[in-house]
Image (tube, rainbow, N blue to C red):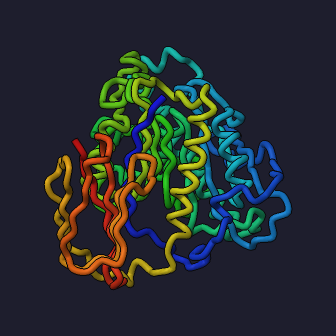
Amino acid sequence: MKTRLYLLLILATASSQLFAQCGSRYKDMIFPNVTVTSDVTYSTSNSTTLKMDIYEPTGDTASTRPVLIMAHGGSFIGGDKTESVCAQLCTNYAKRGYVAASINYRLEGNPLNMLDSIKAITIVLKSISDGKSAVRFFRKDAATTNTYKIDTNWIFAGGNSAGAVTYMHVMYLDSTGEAPAAMQGIINSNGGFEGNSGNDGYSSKIQGVMNLAGGLNVPEFVGPGSGPSFNAQGDQDATVPYGCANAQGGATPVRLCGLGAIEPLYVQYNVNHVSIVYPGAGHVPWQSNAGEMTQIDTTSANFFYSLMCSSSTSIHDVKFEANIMLFPNPANTQLNLHTSVQPSSVAILNNLGQTVLLQNNIEGNNLQFNTSTLAKGIYLVKIEFADRNYMTAIRKVVIE
């Protein structure tokens, strides 16, 4: 099956310089074996014991590591932390040098309750509360026993299907007041914005989200300054609607908006992200397709690596953004580029992130590209500048 890949990489750098130069760690599977500690309790709040499985690279001597927290699918009525998608990603990320965790969270015991909008929203908000508690668990551990040696500057989280819905809201819902009025009362009755799932006193902030067929109740939760995301979804998904509709093919009377509605906002607000769309595919096609699962694993790892490891330049050192004009757009046989600052290199990337045209050693601010040999589709133009006071720029262009 062909895929569409949308890529927008703005300059992303560490608040700590620890990972500025990572080498192959966090990108390649450099550890042959993984140690799994099963059924670690991360919360006993709400008369419920919540557990996670923690994956670590066997024999690792690093004093601090990033962590990836994953939540399983199951429509908020089923599923478990041993789900194959989460378990495989946790294993592979641990082989790259991460700590990874697959969590359980509270589920609705009566599936018929998902036909009631208030009850459905309530169980989703409980899962969000639990997801935040899992993040705080690792920050609490880092501040106390330091059992897992986590660098709290780099906590990523995400999930598959319902688990992705959970962590998309952890990532992009910034306050109770931002939520729709009907949701605000439910939030307040379940412990407030941070929830009531324990590990209080620590931040639930995550530095990036892995969104595998998840979505948001309100896509406009994404806005200026929103954090990075890796996304994948089939464009015929109705369980978590690719656009905006009621979930579960309309059976659950709660609006949910998938990647088709969120992607334009990522682009509008220059949110650092990578999105893979599987044309013609329904819900979580990678769950039964090894090739797609490998693509998601590799592409997401490369994306998170770029956040931690691609640059040793502090974001605070970047002062300017160049003015850029690309025309015509859409283009046919020729693409023109004008920049206010002389670029050092310009690359055109296809939907797999591969360079198809490249110009180096540039003189002047005006360039022309012969695009007559390129297949029709969406491409990205990556512009780098010798003057490091100017950030690398990414622009989208359509070739017709």
Residue 79 x/y as whole percent? 63, 28
For this rendering, which residue is in front, 311 or 53? 311
For this rendering, which residue is in front, 44 or 340? 340
Q: Could one spot residue 231 in this view of the protein?
A: yes
Tell me if 341 is positioned left or right of 272 in this view: left
Say which residue appears at 65% left-offset and 39% top-offset.
Answer: 86
Query: Residue 321: which quarter of the image?
Result: bottom left
Say which residue appears at 68% left-offset and 59% top-offset.
Answer: 98
Say which residue appears at 78% left-offset and 58% top-offset.
Answer: 31
Task: Work out whether 294 lies above or below 307.
Answer: above
Q: Residue furthest left?
A: 328
Residue 96 x/y as whole percent? 70, 57
Residue 339 x/y as whole percent? 20, 73
Tell me if 382 is positioned left or right of 198 in this view: left
Query: Residue 217: which quarter of the image?
Result: top left
Say which residue appears at 73% left-offset and 67% top-offset.
Answer: 149
Residue 92 x/y as whole percent? 70, 48
Tag count: 0
For this rendering, which residue is in front, 158 or 192? 158
Tell me if 244 is positioned left or right of 227 in this view: left
Q: Could one spot residue 205 in this view of the protein?
A: no
Task: Work out whether 313 lies above or below 70.
Answer: below
Query: Residue 269: which quarter of the image?
Result: bottom left
Instruction: State the quadrant of the C terminus.
Output: top left
